Image: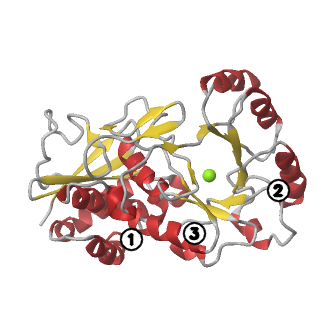
Amino acid sequence: MFRIARARRSAVANVFVALSADGITGYGEASPNSFYDETAEKVSHALRGATPWIEGLRVRSVADIERLWDELWARLAPSRAAQCAVDLALWDWLAKAEQTRVSALLWSRAPAPVATFCTLGLSTPEELESKIDELEGFPLVKLKSDQTADLDPVRRVRARSRARIAVDANGSWAASRLEALASSLGTMGVEFLEQPLPDSAAREWSAPALALPVMADESCVTETDLDRLPALYSGFNIKLVKCGGLTAGARMARRGAERGLSTMVGCMLESSLLIGAGAALAQETKYADLDGAWLLSDDPFDGWRFESGMLLPGDGFGFGAEPKPGVFGEPDGAAPRPGSL
Ligand SMILES: [Mg+2]
């Protein structure tokens, strides 16, 4: 039997869940994104409605969590973000109960440091210069692009940095220009292009392979999207909050590897807790894009440390991330009181 507590942090507009049983507390997080019609209010509403059921859960093994995943969805739909928060809390709780790390439960080994892409948002030329300076020495840089498909920022980063570069257009480019743009990026040695076209246009794309690999993001939300992944893509971006948590994320990573697809684990704006969960998955993905906590001025969790584009494992069991005092309403960081949803 679990006791459940919820917390909201305006700094990230995220929802945190704490599940306590047997003197152990597992933590989960949802980073709702309006693109997927999720808000903190909707996540909280879904969690509130399922609280008595969640508090009656018992988990003793990874198989228990995997079995529960579909039931979580039945109770928390339509919020994959709420499902993610509870799923993560169960993984964190189980690993702590077994005095091990979630990566050990998933992959039978301790977590290793993770090299992560760091994202450069759309910028003026002046802003870009100072951002490039900030990323000096970082191994992986991702540039956002918009419908202008301006490749000049990519050229500027390429000229100033030895980082491996990716470009993410968030579905904003036109299909008519894609081949030529991909050719230019390929010439610049860009590692991959993420979601260049809107999903509908990606599904219609039937031209020959492009000059660089293309990864799906908005075209690959949940596991079922893997079975209908458009031919344009040679890989996909897994976001725990999109697919319903680590249980589904790990299945997607395994299925992607079986099919020879490149996998990446990405993030929204999230605390070190969700980043720690992503890092557990990133132990077995080709790429990680987990800079979401680095961008926070007030991270509610202590956990994985970010140093020059590397994530270094946090201490302790579970995901290796613990809430800062007061996050769950307890000034000393003690286990949360029950019934505070
Ligand atoms: Mg993306």
Looking at the picture, how far across and down is residue 53, in whole percent? Answer: 19, 71
Looking at the picture, how far across and down is residue 319, in whole percent? Answer: 32, 50
Checking the image for residue 77, the label placed there is 1
Q: Is residue 95 left or right of residue 151?
A: left
What amino acid does circle 3 point to? Answer: Ala
For residue 117, above or below residue 198: above
- Residue picked out by circle 3: 257
Residue at disc 1, CB closer than 8 Å to ligand 1: no
Task: Specify which label sits upstream in the sequence, 1 or 2.
Answer: 1
Task: Specify which label sits upstream in the sequence, 3 or 1.
Answer: 1
Q: Residue at x 9, y 53 (%)?
A: 23
Dots 1 and 2: beta carbons under 8 Å?
Answer: no
Mark 1 lies on a secondary structure that is loop
Looking at the picture, how far across and down is residue 335, in whole percent? Answer: 13, 46
Q: Nearer the viewer, mark 2 or mark 3?
A: 3
Please rate how many residues cluster around mark 1, counting C-alpha atoms within 10 Å: few if below 14, some from 14 to 19, many from 20.
some
What amino acid does circle 2 point to? Answer: Ala
Mark 2 lies on a secondary structure that is loop
- Label 2 to label 3, Cα distance in Å? 30 Å
Looking at the picture, how far across and down is residue 153, in whole percent? Answer: 77, 34
What amino acid does circle 1 point to? Answer: Ala
- Residue picked out by circle 2: 174
Q: Residue at x 72, y 29 (%)?
A: 161
Q: Quadrant of residue 79?
A: bottom left
Residue 116 in view, yes or no: yes
Q: Residue at x 74, y 45 (%)?
A: 146
Checking the image for residue 292, the label placed there is none
Relative depth, front residue between 106 and 152:
106
